[in-house]
Structures are given as structure tokens and as C-alpha cells.
Image (cartoon, helix red, strand yellow):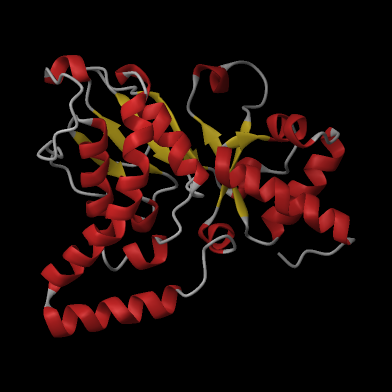
């Protein structure tokens, strides 16, 4: 990020952007508490990030937003902001996969994706298996966060129970946008690791703000916690419905960045 100001200010601004990437959408007051900045200081950094196109304002569709007074503003990372954290060599990786698809076919790309994700699966399996069944999604999220995916686990909002695994960052999002086999292989690995069907609801690669995976309730599925390689992945594709809780807010609606 090339914002104006001293090196310390740029570092702080980068930290604010990183927090929005990992925990967003998030309010200005929550950011100020995490970074230890005054309301005026956090507003200054948010204004700068908005001007650079690194973040955007969203408005929550929650009961709080219908209370008297101005609704809370939530800040989320943009594609431009996320690209500042994306690992290098995306173009080279995309070109290599294009060549593989042209010379050996799409099935070769799918096999490559499975082999790539196999190492991650091998490393995560002992950690996930050691966790109690009811904590395995959270344990997987922690392992993913250790690899830079900024993941979190939460109860699923839809009827029927289950949990959601949310990844706020994807190191290969730009490549996966052209080659969804990468997302599919990852989803299959999640199902095997957790021993229960999973369904990808949204992906960063397809323009969603977060990669969201629904993990079926082990009780409803009748699974006994075994890590069956044949555990199924529920249909629904990689990029389904976007998260309904938040909507984009136009500049006219959002105004400034007041708390």
C-alpha cells in the first residue's frame, strides 16, 4: 500500500487493512479497539483506505440497523485490497495450468489440484482427528489460519443445524477463478477430514467476499466421527448464494466513516 504519511502510519494502515481482511466485515469501533486507536485516528485510516479502493462500506441487515439513529457501518476488503495480500506468481501458475489443460485435458488439472491439496490434508489430519468431534470444524479453521487462510468456524444460520467454515483469504483466488478444480479438491478434502458431507456455498474466486463451506451436522448424517475417504460432498457447486447478512452500500448512502 502506497498511502501518504510516515512509515509508522503506513504500517498502521496496513495493519488495519489486514484486520479487515481477516475479521471483516467489521465496524470502525471494533477496529479501533483492536488496534488501540482513537475514533478520530481510525476514521483517518479508514478514509485513506476507502480513497485507495482497498476497502468498501457495507450496511448490515440486522435488528440493530433498524434501531433509531444511523445504522452501523461495516468495512470489508475489496478485490483490490485482497490482491495486495495475494501471493506472487499467479500469472505463472495460471499459464502453467492452461498449458496442462490444453495438452492433457481438464482431468489432468483436477488430478493436479488433488495432489496439491493432499499435502495440506496430510498435515491437518492428525490435528483434526485428535480434536473432539464437536470441535473439529474449529480445529480445522485454526489450522487453515496458520497457513494464511484467515479462517473461522461458526454455527450455521440455516435450519437443520451444522456449522460453517469461513475463509476470509484465499492465496490462490485469482488462479481458482479460472480453474475451479482447486476449490473442488479443497472441498473434497474438508469432507474427508471432517468425516461428514460438506457444501461450498460461496468462494472468493467467484466474487464472494468469503469462502463459505457448510458442514453438515454429524448427528443428522449419522456419522460416527470416522474419517471415511468416501465421505460425500453435497451438491451445490463451488459458488452458490452470497451471504445475505450484508449488502453493499452506495457512497451516497454511506457518507463518511463516522463511528
Specify the quadrant that holds the C terminus: top right
| Residue lying at 32% horizontally and 54% vertically, measured from the top left | 119
* Image position of 84 with respect to 144: above or below: below
Q: Is residue 97 visible?
A: yes
State the residue in front, 119 or 172: 119
Figure disc tally? 0
Position of residue 231 measured from the top left corner of the image (x, y, whole percent): 13, 36
State the residue in front, 1 or 141: 141
| Occupied quadrant, residue 124 | top left
Position of residue 25 measured from the top left corner of the image (x, y, whole percent): 55, 38
State the residue in front, 203 or 93: 93
Specify the quadrant that holds the N terminus: bottom right
| Residue lying at 79% horizontally and 50% vertically, measured from the top left | 12
Position of residue 27 measured from the top left corner of the image (x, y, whole percent): 65, 33
- Determine the residue located farthest toward the right in the rendered image: 6
| Residue lying at 26% horizontally and 31% vertically, measured from the top left | 194
Is 48 displayed left or right of 151 in the figure?
right
Is 109 displayed left or right of 24 in the figure?
left
Q: Is residue 240 visible?
A: no
* Image position of 48 with respect to 33: above or below: below
Is 145 displayed left or right of 39 in the figure?
left
| Occupied quadrant, residue 33 | top right
Amino acid at each position: 500500500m502506497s498511502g501518504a504519511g510516515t512509515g509508522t502510519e503506513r504500517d498502521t494502515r496496513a495493519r488495519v487493512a489486514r484486520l479487515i481482511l481477516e475479521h471483516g466485515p467489521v465496524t470502525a469501533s471494533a477496529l479501533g479497539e483492536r488496534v488501540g486507536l482513537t475514533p478520530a485516528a481510525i476514521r483517518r485510516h479508514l478514509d485513506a483506505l476507502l480513497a485507495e479502493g482497498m476497502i468498501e462500506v457495507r450496511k448490515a441487515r440486522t435488528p440493530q440497523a433498524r434501531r433509531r439513529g444511523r445504522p452501523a457501518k461495516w468495512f470489508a476488503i475489496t478485490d483490490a485490497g485482497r490482491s495486495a495480500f495475494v501471493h506472487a506468481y499467479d500469472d505463472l501458475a495460471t499459464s502453467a495450468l492452461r498449458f496442462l489443460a490444453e495438452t492433457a485435458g481438464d482431468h489432468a488439472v483436477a488430478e493436479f489440484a488433488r495432489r496439491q491439496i493432499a499435502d495440506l490434508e496430510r498435515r491437518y489430519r492428525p490435528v483434526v482427528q485428535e480434536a473432539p468431534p464437536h470441535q473439529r470444524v474449529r480445529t480445522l479453521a485454526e489450522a487453515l489460519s496458520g497457513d494464511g487462510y484467515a479462517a473461522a468456524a461458526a454455527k450455521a444460520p440455516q435450519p437443520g443445524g451444522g456449522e460453517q467454515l469461513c475463509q476470509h483469504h484465499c492465496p490462490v483466488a485469482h488462479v481458482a477463478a479460472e480453474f475451479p478444480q482447486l476449490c473442488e479438491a479443497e472441498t473434497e478434502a474438508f469432507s474427508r477430514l471432517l468425516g461428514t458431507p460438506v457444501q461450498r456455498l460461496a468462494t472468493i474466486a467467484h466474487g464472494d467476499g468469503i469462502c463459505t463451506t457448510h458442514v453438515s451436522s454429524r448427528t443428522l448424517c449419522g456419522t460416527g466421527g470416522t474419517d471415511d475417504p468416501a465421505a460425500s460432498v453435497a451438491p451445490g457447486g463451488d459458488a452458490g448464494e452470497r451471504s445475505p447478512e450484508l449488502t453493499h452500500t452506495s457512497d451516497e448512502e454511506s457518507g463518511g466513516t463516522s463511528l
